[in-house]
Structure formats: structure tokens, C-alpha cells
Amino acid sequence: MRIAIASDHAAFSLKRELAQWLAEQGHEVTDLGSDSEASVDYPDYGYAIANHIAEGRAERGIALCGSGIGIAIAVNRHPGARCAQVAEPLSARLARSHNDANVIALGARLIGADMARACIEAFLSTAFAGERHQRRVAKLSHPAIAGACAMKAETA
């Protein structure tokens, strides 16, 4: 699988470890930075991974920062990216099966490398369930559809 990975400075060490592990698993890994523990801005790396995914240059993405929260917000600014911040495997599975997440965000200061690997394994091995979830996921990439539905509900 083609996987993009990106982090800010707080998650640099974990990103490097995970990128190596993913490559050892046979995945094609693109490291979008950061390249050191020198202070950087997580939105830059969130936007980079979102663009990479939306352009089809990777099938899945792994975004990391100190908490996983900020970078998840940055990734989700792109309508072609669906990022879920996860801290354990069940959330990673549900993000894929129910929400067709194409990126997960992990907090390097909140979880260790073993838990991060468990989350990634669940994320990569779970298929989107489709069916009843499909129309909901479609609204995530097309806010006008969701907005029209919300306006209709308010006037009812």
C-alpha cells in the first residue's frame, strides 16, 4: 500500500520509527516531513498530507503531532481528506469501516510506539463498510449537500 506519513517536531521520532516499520512491512512510504525535532508548525504538515492523499499519490495517510488533535484539524480542512484522531485500535477500525477515513492522526505524547503500530495495523487492514455509511461519507466531501440538508431540517 502507498502510505504518506507526516509529523511536526513533537512526533518526529515516532514518525521516523513508524515509517521504517511500515517499509519493513512492505508498504511504499512517503515521508512528508518534518525532518528534525526543530520547532515547526503542524498545520504545514497536515496540509501536505491532505494534499498528497487528495491528489491520489497515497492511499492512506498517517499524521502525527504531540496530541494528534492539531494535525487532524489541519488535515480535515481539505475536502478530499477524512482524518480521525485515534488512540486505540477500535477507533482506528471504526474510522475506516464507518467513516472511510483515509488518514489517521496519532498523538506522540499520548501513546507509545506499540499502541501506534496497533492503531495503524487496524487502520490499514479494515475496509470501508459502505452501504448505510456511504451517503454520510459523501456529505463529508461535499459540504453543500450537508448544508442543504441542515437548512431543510431547520425549516421543518
Image (tube, rainbow, N blue to C red):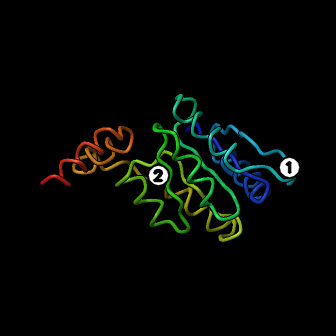
Residue type at mark 2? Answer: Ser
Q: Would residue 81 be found to the left or right of residue 64 on screen? A: left
The local secondary structure at tag 2 comes to helix
Image coordinates for residue 145, horizontal then vertical, percent = 28, 39
> Looking at the image, do the residues carrying marks 2 and 1 touch, with CB atoms under 8 Å apart?
no
Taking depth in this image into account, of 46 and 57 the one nearest to the observer is: 46
The local secondary structure at tag 1 comes to loop
Q: Is residue 55 above or below residue 97?
A: above
Q: Image point 62% across, 60% down: which residue?
A: 68
Say which of marks 2 and 1 sits in front: 1
Residue type at mark 1? Answer: Ser
Residue extending farthest left: 156
Q: Is residue 1 above or below residue 19?
A: above
Q: Image point 65% across, 63% down: which residue?
A: 107
Image coordinates for residue 1, horizontal then vertical, percent = 55, 38
Mark 2–mark 1 Cα distance, whole angstroms, equals 30 Å
Q: Residues within 10 Å of mark 2 (few under 14, many from 20)?
A: few
Q: Residues within 10 Å of mark 1 (few under 14, many from 20)?
A: some
Q: Image point 49% across, 58% down: which residue?
A: 122
Image coordinates for residue 119, horizontal then vertical, percent = 55, 61
| Residue bearing the label numbered 2 | 125
Image coordinates for residue 104, horizontal then vertical, percent = 54, 53
- Determine which quarter of the picture holds residue 31: top right
Taking depth in this image into account, of 122 and 37 the one nearest to the observer is: 37
| Residue bearing the label numbered 1 | 36
